[in-house]
Structure formats: structure tokens, C-alpha cells
Amino acid sequence: MLTRFLLLVGASPLIFVAGVFLHNVLSWLLQVEEPVFFLVAIVGAPLAFVVGAVGTTVALVRRLATRP
């Protein structure tokens, strides 16, 4: 479980960059403001980071608490 949360923390900056890039490319190609990838970058990526960071902390505390 710990590795999944760590992967989520590591992937969140990539999600942000991909969302911004796709938003800019689609806005340029379609000549219309595209909100979906913008919201993924602005809301989804930070939310994924927070969930991953909290999950990592909880998993580490649980792992350390169960050790003799």
C-alpha cells in the first residue's frame, strides 16, 4: 500500500504538466478554451499529491507502530 501512495505522490507533478500541456495544445488547435484538462491540472494533480502524502504518512505510521 505504501508503494501505491508513493507512486501517486510522484505521479502528481507529471499529471499537472500533462494537463497543462494538453490544455494548451487543445486550446491552440481548437481555438476555444478547453476546461477539462485545465481542471485536471489545477484540481486533480494537487488533490492526488495530498492524498498520496497523507496516505504515505498513515502507512508509515502504521508500519512503525506494528514493529516490536
Image (spheres, rainbow, N blue to C red):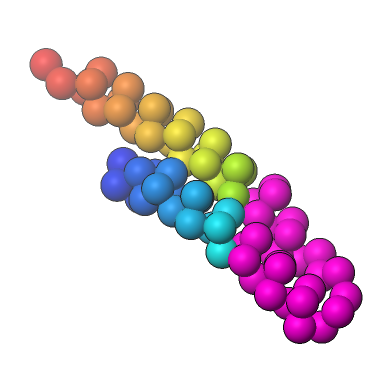
Q: Is residue 24 left or right of residue 30?
A: left
Q: Quadrant of the N terminus?
A: top left
In x, y percent, where is residue 25? 69, 75
Q: Is residue 33 left or right of residue 14?
A: right
Whether residue 12 is in magenta: the answer is no
In x, y percent, where is residue 8? 43, 49
In the depicted structure, whether residue 14 falls above or below residue 23: above
In the depicted structure, whether residue 50 falls above or below residue 28: above
Q: Is residue 48 left or right of residue 26?
A: left
Q: Residue at x 52, y 41 (%)?
A: 49
Q: Quadrant of the C terminus?
A: top left
- Report the residue that reaches farthest toward the left: 68
Q: Residue at x 76, y 83 (%)?
A: 29
Q: Residue at x 23, y 21 (%)?
A: 64
Q: Main secondary structure of the magenta part?
A: helix
Which of these two is toward me, 33 or 44?
Answer: 33
- Report the residue that reaches farthest toward the right: 32
Q: Is residue 3 visible?
A: yes
Residues drawn in magenta: 19-44
